[in-house]
Image (cartoon, rainbow, N blue to C red):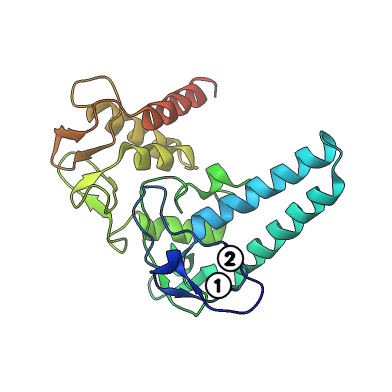
Amino acid sequence: MTDRQGDTLLNGGLGSPLNPVGLICSSFRPSDDATLLGFLIPSNLFAVESLTQMAEILSTVRNNQALADECTALAKEVHQAVQDYGIVDHPKFGKVYAYEVDGFGNYICMDDANVPSLLALPYLCSFISNDDPVYLQTRKLVWSNSNPYFFKGSVAEGIGGPHIGFDFVWPMSIIMKALTSTSQEEIDQSIEVLRNTDGGTGFMHESFNINDANDFTRTWFAWANTLFGELIYEQYNK
């Protein structure tokens, strides 16, 4: 939620305090894990995209310009707040998008495999290109050991999250890396890894062990299978 009255917010009533700077509060991440700092930057940027789309529908389909203008105003407020509080200086990668912030100047640099994620920003947001400098620096950060939930083993590397635990990567992160890549070689390599880590099932899973693809969670995970289908369809039609 946003609070324009200037009062400090509590994340979910029990979480860390938040400074009402124009960002939208999330008590939970897309993975259903609780946020540590309540302003989840990927979700705020996705909200900007959704509010902008909503404004277009309200204006052109519903002929409700007043509500469309409210959506546009909120989108601009949130987007500006992300620019002011969600982009931080990392000592190794320079200006990057933080994963979570609190509006007081505190932030967390990481990424979670679940979408909305920092890795997925160009996929979700039409106003962020996959060659945007801040995104590219963020991408390097989250696909490296600087992200505490990036894991690399004998069969694969990728992003996981606290929902499953250490040493398990999510095919969703590898798929999203390919969907946002500007390198055909990187895309081809990602597809090869996905093909070789299905545990002999022919399907994408929620996660798998970086050293043993037969050790996986969720035999059927529609979200990842759908994204994988989108990736293959996109490549087929190139």
193 left or right of 92 in image: left
Q: Classify the position of the C terminus by image quarter.
A: top right
Alpha carbon of mark 2 to alpha carbon of mark 1: how far? Answer: 9 Å
Q: Classify the position of the N terminus by image quarter.
A: bottom right
Q: Amino acid at mark 2?
A: Leu
The residue shown at (55%, 60%) is: 133
Q: Which residue occupies the foreground of this view, 119 or 56? A: 56
Q: Amino acid at mark 1?
A: Tyr
Check whether the beta carbons of the residues at disc 2 and disc 1 lie within 8 A of each other. yes
Please name the residue that numbered disc 1 is placed on: 85
Element at badge 1? helix
The residue shown at (18%, 26%) is: 199
114 left or right of 192 in image: right
**Residue 137 location, x and y as percent?**
46, 61
- Mark 2 is surrounded, within 10 Å at the Cα level, by few (under 14), some (14 to 19) or many (20 or more) other residues, namely many
Please state which of the two labelled residues, at mark 2 or mark 1, is closer to the viewer: 2
Q: Quadrant of residue 195?
A: top left
**Residue 166 location, x and y as percent?**
19, 52
Residue 157 in sight from this viewpoint:
yes
The residue shown at (66%, 67%) is: 80
Please name the residue that numbered disc 2 is placed on: 23
